[in-house]
Image (cartoon, grey):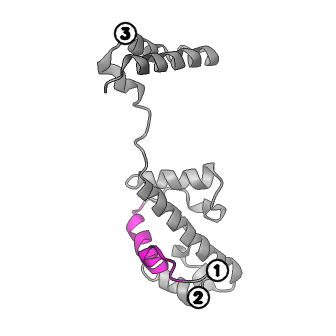
Amino acid sequence: MKLDRYQRLSLYNQLKILKSVENTDEYDIWIQILHEGFEYNYDDLFDWLHEPTSKDISEFVIEVLDMFRWIEHYKRDNPSDIEICGNYNSSFRGFDGNHEGKYCGYANFLIKDKGLWEESKNGIANSHSPMVDIYYKMLTVFKPNGIYAFEYPLTKIQVEQILAVH
């Protein structure tokens, strides 16, 4: 990684301010790296930052959460439908934290941190099994070609069609 003198000075000043405000020595090593211009260690400044989550992953997670919102609304409006309400796959189960980390992290951010998709809050835990392919298949029924296949609210038959791909 290369940093020009302006970038180094800007980061250096920001770290000095943080050190002062937080009254800590935690930033001293990074301040020294920037001050001395130790290019080999510039990456140390950014090691704690996660790689970006792509827009495609973000949009996929949002579409999955929307699909389960529609299913949850059906369940709420039809509590006596034991077949659907009792179906384990009719609730958002999250994503695999080990293999679908970006999906899992973004879903947690939307549900837990932003307080969106409240009805899916029980599914934000690690599913401990891959879910992306399953959700993708469900979305091909719910929203083929990016267009909603059904009108709101869903009927029992439509929910069954979505869940049948599981």
Q: Residue beneath label 2, please?
A: 156
Q: Would residue 46 be found to the left or right of residue 121 on screen? A: left
Q: Residue beneath label 1, please?
A: 74
- Secondary element at image label 2: helix
Spatial CA span between label 1 and label 2: 8 Å
Numbered label tally: 3
Q: Amino acid at mark 3?
A: Glu
- Camera-side residue: 144 or 74? 144
Front disc: 2 or 3: 3
Comes first in the chain, label 3 or label 1 = 3
Q: Amino acid at mark 2?
A: Lys
- The quarter of the rendered structure image containing the N terminus is top left
What residue is rendered at 54% in x and 83% in y? 150
The reply to whether the C-beta atoms of the residues labelled 1 and 2 are less than 8 Å apart is: yes
For the record, the magenta segment spans 129-150
Question: Picture coordinates of residue 73 (x, y %)?
Answer: 65, 76
Is residue 135 one of those drawn in magenta? Answer: yes
